[in-house]
Amino acid sequence: MLKVDKINKAFTVNGSEKNILNNITFTIEAGEFVCILGPSGSGKTTLLRCIGGFEALTNGNMLLDGQSISRPGIDRIMVFQGFEQLFGWKTVEANVEYPLKINQIDKGNRQELVRKYLSMVGLENYKTYYPHQLSGGMKQRAAIARALALEPRILLMDEPFGNLDAQTRNSLQNELLKIWSELKTTILFVTHDIEEAIILSDRILVLSTSGEVKSIIPNRLERPRKPGNFGFAELWDLLYSQLGD
Amino acid sequence: MRMKKYTAILLVVALLGAFVLGGCSANNPSKTTNKGGSKVTIALQFGLAYAPVQIMKEKNLLEKYLPGAEISWKQMGTGPAIRDAMVTGQVDVGFMGISPFLIGWDKGAEWKIATAAGSQPLGLVTYKENIKKVSDFSSTDRIATPAVASIQQMLLSMAAEKESGNPRALDNLMVSITHPDAVTSLLGKKDVTAHFSSPPYIFQELADKDVHQILNGEDAFGGEFTFIFGVATNKFHDANPSAYAAFVAAFNEAISFINNNPQEAAKILAPVNQLSEAETYKSLTWNGTNYCSTPFGIIGLAEFMKNSGYISKVPSNLSEIAFENVEAAIGKRYGEMSAIEKLQLRKSDINGQ
Amino acid sequence: MANKSKAAFYQKALFVLILMLLWETVARMEFFNPTVFPSVTSIIAAFLKGVASGLLVEKTVYSLYLILKGLILSLLAAILLSSLAMGFRTVENILDILNSILHPLPGIALLPVAILWFGIGEGSIIFIIIHSVLWPMVVNFMTGFKTIPRIHLDVGENIGLKGLHLLWGVMLPASLPYLLSGIKIAWARAWRAVIAAEMVFGAASGSAGGLGWHIYMTRYMFDMAGTFAALLAIIIVGIGVEELLFKNIEKFTVVKWGMTI
């Protein structure tokens, strides 16, 4: 469904050109949960932003369902890192409804979608709250609901649980998996956390520090996955060694 | 909580106390100005109407009549500003037009006219060819005068009354603009169609081929009238008679000097007024300029001001608004008005003329 | 929470009362000439007379009308210029240099220029108001726009907003705290500008003239109680606008949204 072909992305830093992404090629199938794993500075956020259309490619091209993609669009909705992605001047409910409104979805359908996705993330009792009244975890759940409500072709997630404490992170990971198995959405998830990658993904794309695809590793462990399970530790070691260079 | 409230009150009282004590000296005559002829403060405004005061200052005439005195000069922007300074005891003698003086007198300010600085030629000029007299103005015209209740506004009302019987006919046409801004507007030929002007501004305006004068002040008033008066506080006059007398004498000498030595006076006055010597001389000798310490037209102006609602009463007697030397100059004939007294009235008031 | 603000209110009221009493005492004892230091009672009397006759109200309304006109024009101009500056580097640079040149100029200093260009009608006064108000507004708006988290704009673009829709849907609400702060500053400056301009410039003939003109006239007529009454009117309007208008706008927007600066 998503085809990324030999893409390069260079930034000009202090007058000289630095290649953040180097010749990256991969494909994603519909319904897959793919994690992009890499150390800091490996360009994983940049890769996601390129796919989202927020950065322009220097070279190469990308195709979604056979169509070339370059600008942001509602077929690829991003859930960002950080707690400021909700609009502070709208309630949780309004935040989820707003993208639907401006994309001309009629009132009846809108309200149904809002209700469905808010209850999916467990926030139906908080729909009249303002973002500043929510905890970090709740904010991210609201952001996920907003992203899902548009029912995009692919959900792009940029370390959405990175700023949360371990407990909240765990519960959100489980929630996300539940939603994914129910909706069968395609998810591209960026993380630097090996454990998170193993728990969530069908496949793991490892990026090297020089911005190249180091390896693409399938993850066939049985779900639900817990660190003690069979095969977990081996996979962990493998990924750890991949990140080493 | 209690402590805070008490400290706050204490602070306020202390502050106000300081304020009051500071202000005390301002109102205490012995501290500021004129005890024993030691200090005199004179306030004047800008322009050749104040020429005698300027001469007095430049030639140190007051020091001649009051040796050892400390004379301090204040240049101020408006009559009301001088009035405020005089009422609070900071200035002993101030030069201003009839309006600020009479309005102050009406409201109880304790001051009187000590001398006159003279008459000035005031001319109503316009660039519109078809306007030859005041009744030619239409509702879209605008006439610039220096201030509300200024002598120029009153003269316009008098002219309107003369021509149409209604003194308020031009009320909506009058705009208050300072002389320099009025000149620019008039010569720009935009909104301002006429300006009640005086030298040196009027020279600039008449130099433009379209601009012509349609009225002068004397015709509007019906006689000569004093433009600027020298006003002294009662405190100054009563507490320091020798300084007061010295002032009157010095001022008269200044006026005499201008009238008898206009060329020399022009030389002294040119830099003070930021004009060339030639322009200064021209203004000093322009028809209608009359430096004279005897006032003209006071009662006529007072009556007009009362009828216009600027003041509540007319002085019944010259001594109410002027000191004894002014009365002496005007002269009083037993049983009837002196010739100069008659000149205090507007032509229309005398014998119903 | 309610007790704290109640106590604060009483403290402030008490202070004002004490101040008024002290003023009245000083006035009555005639430390200063009563014509230039009117008592509180005479000021309030003049104020009530002015309100009853409608004169004070008329003048205040006229000044407010001029301010409103100037503020609305400035607001639109500020939003336009700031938005353009966000999109085009050249505009931002031009705006920056214009601000450096013009902002330090007090509005009154431009009065002669204003008369030359806009004549002697209310146009000159509106010009002075706009000049006094535009630059602080633009600076605040620009700051507001610049401090919008990048993430907000990304989300906006992601869900399909562009250009004017992005401006209306995301940029303006996101920068509302700064917009409001800019408007509050603008209001205070506009007040100052209009009073000062009217005092120097006088009223355009035929029009009612505003509070500044009223102060000029009462001063000329040696009616100090009237001057102070006009000042009282200015204070009342200032407090009124702050407490009734701005505080409430903030309550229903930035305070409710947890977006105070």
Image (cartoon, coloured by chain):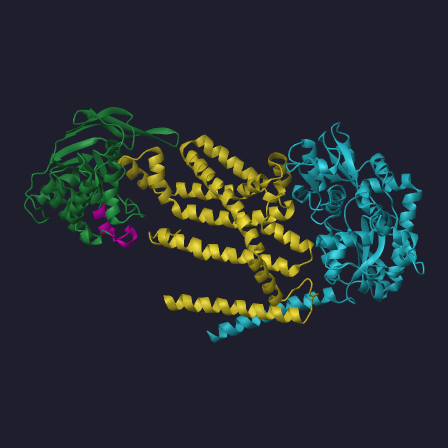
Whether residue B57 is visible to the viewer of this picture, yes or no, is no
Q: Is residue C86 magenta?
A: no
**Looking at the colours in the rendered structure, which chain would you say is drawn in cyan?**
B
The residue under the point 15% across, 39% down is A239
> Which portion, as a residue range, is magenta?
A128-142
Estimate the x, y position of residue A63 in percent, counting from the top left: 19, 26
| Magenta stretch secondary structure, dominant | helix
**Looking at the colours in the rendered structure, which chain would you say is drawn in yellow?**
C
The residue under the point 36% across, 51% down is C253
The residue under the point 92% across, 52% down is B339
Q: Is residue B184 above or below residue B311?
A: above
Q: Is residue B345 above or below residue B217?
A: below
Q: How many marks?
A: 0
Left/right placement of residue B172 relative to residue A73 reads right
The residue under the point 11% across, 40% down is A183
Residue at the extreme front of the image, as rendered:
B352
Estimate the x, y position of residue C53 in percent, counting from the top left: 58, 57
Q: Quadrant of the N terminus of chain A?
A: top left
Estimate the x, y position of residue A101 in percent, counting from the top left: 25, 39
Viewer-proximal residue among C29 and C99: C29
Whether residue B277 is visible to the viewer of this picture, yes or no, is yes
Viewer-proximal residue among A160 and B49: B49
Q: Quadrant of the C terminus of chain A?
A: top left
Estimate the x, y position of residue B98 in percent, counting from the top left: 78, 52
**Looking at the colours in the rendered structure, which chain would you say is drawn in green?**
A
Left/right placement of residue B123 relative to residue C254 reads right
